[in-house]
Image (cartoon, grey):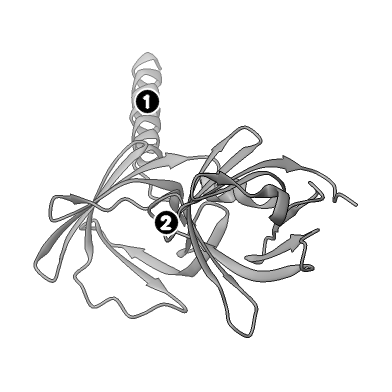
């Protein structure tokens, strides 16, 4: 009886140990891309993530934006293929995958370039600085060519910039009436590009920085600097 009990406990121990190992080295779950190295060049995107589900489906995105869905397959040789339903066919070789608990590495060649991607398991979607741009902003100052020009561009001191979730923007309480347009943010740096809806569109390109509820925009195509504060209701 004693020998039987000892054998049973031994089998149970190894069974649990094997199960824990399988769980630790499981690709299923949410992963954050920590680094992308292409031929020794750092091309890491901002807040890039990928989720692998138990049913063989996968999804990926950047920050709050999910832009890819599809399927994946990880074979017994740890070769990973990912297919995006609405994406472009991937003709490169499969990724060779190494999983060590909460860390994962993908490696392969693309056009004779060595690709190494490092990922880390996480339990929530990452937030990029660009995600924090959404919302309503009040103009504090507008400086052009070193001169404060708010008196002419924002005489009421109630000028607002509304950055909407659908990547359109509104300029409100503007001297020449409300203005509309669309914007996009860069996937590798803190940059926002804006173009107005007009017969002759105006293109504006800014780097941005956020500190709490303060936003600083610096134009890259002219000498303009704009400071704004986040507000939570429209100014009348």
Q: Outermost residue, top direction?
A: 2
The numbered mark, 1 or 2, whose residue comes first in the sequence reads 1
Q: Nearer the viewer, residue 163 or 199?
A: 199
Q: Is residue 81 left or right of residue 203?
A: left
Q: Is residue 8 left or right of residue 76?
A: right
Label 2 crowd (10 A; few <14 / some 14-19 / many >=20): some
Q: Is residue 194 left or right of residue 5?
A: right
**Residue shown at 66% from the left, 35% from the top:** 213
Residue 230 falls in image quadrant: top right
**Residue shown at 65% from the left, 80% from the top:** 198
Q: Outermost residue, left direction?
A: 112
Q: Nearer the viewer, residue 121 or 3?
A: 121
Instruction: Say if 100 sits above or below 88 in the image.
Output: above
**Residue shown at 31% from the left, 50% from the top:** 44
Res 185 label: none
Query: Is residue 63 in view?
Result: yes
Q: Which residue is mark 1?
A: 13
Q: Which residue is mark 2?
A: 220
Q: Which secondary structure lies at badge 2? A: loop
Question: Which of the two marks, 1 or 2, is nearer to us in this view?
Answer: 2
Q: Which secondary structure lies at badge 1? A: helix
**Residue shown at 50% from the left, 44% from the top:** 146
Residue 179 falls in image quadrant: bottom right
Instruction: Say if 198 sits above or below 142 in the image.
Output: below
Q: Nearer the viewer, residue 37 or 165?
A: 165
Query: Is residue 54 in view?
Result: no
Q: What's the CA distance linking mark 1 and mark 2?
A: 62 Å
């Amino acid at each position: 009886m004693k020998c039987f009990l000892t054998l049973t406990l031994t089998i149970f121990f190894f069974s649990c140990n094997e199960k824990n190992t399988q769980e630790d080295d499981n690709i299923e779950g949410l992963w954050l891309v920590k680094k992308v190295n292409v031929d020794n060049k750092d091309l890491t995107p901002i807040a890039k993530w990928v989720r692998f589900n138990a049913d063989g489906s996968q999804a990926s995105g950047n920050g709050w934006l999910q832009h890819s869905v599809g399927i994946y397959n990880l074979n017994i040789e740890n070769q990973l293929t990912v297919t995006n339903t609405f994406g472009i066919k991937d003709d490169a070789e499969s990724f060779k995958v190494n999983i060590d608990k909460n860390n994962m590495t993908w490696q392969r060649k693309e056009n004779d370039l060595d690709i190494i991607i490092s990922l880390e398991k996480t339990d929530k979607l990452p937030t990029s600085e660009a995600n924090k741009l959404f919302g309503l902003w009040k103009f504090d100052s507008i400086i052009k060519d070193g001169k404060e020009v708010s008196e002419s561009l924002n005489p009421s001191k109630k000028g607002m910039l509304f950055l909407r979730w659908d990547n359109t923007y509104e300029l409100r309480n503007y001297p020449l009436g409300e203005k509309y347009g669309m914007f996009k943010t860069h996937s590798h740096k803190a940059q926002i590009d804006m173009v107005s809806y007009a017969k002759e569109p105006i293109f504006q390109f800014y780097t941005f920085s956020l500190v709490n509820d303060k936003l600083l925009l610096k134009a890259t195509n002219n000498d303009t600097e704009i400071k704004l504060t986040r507000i939570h209701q429209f100014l009348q």
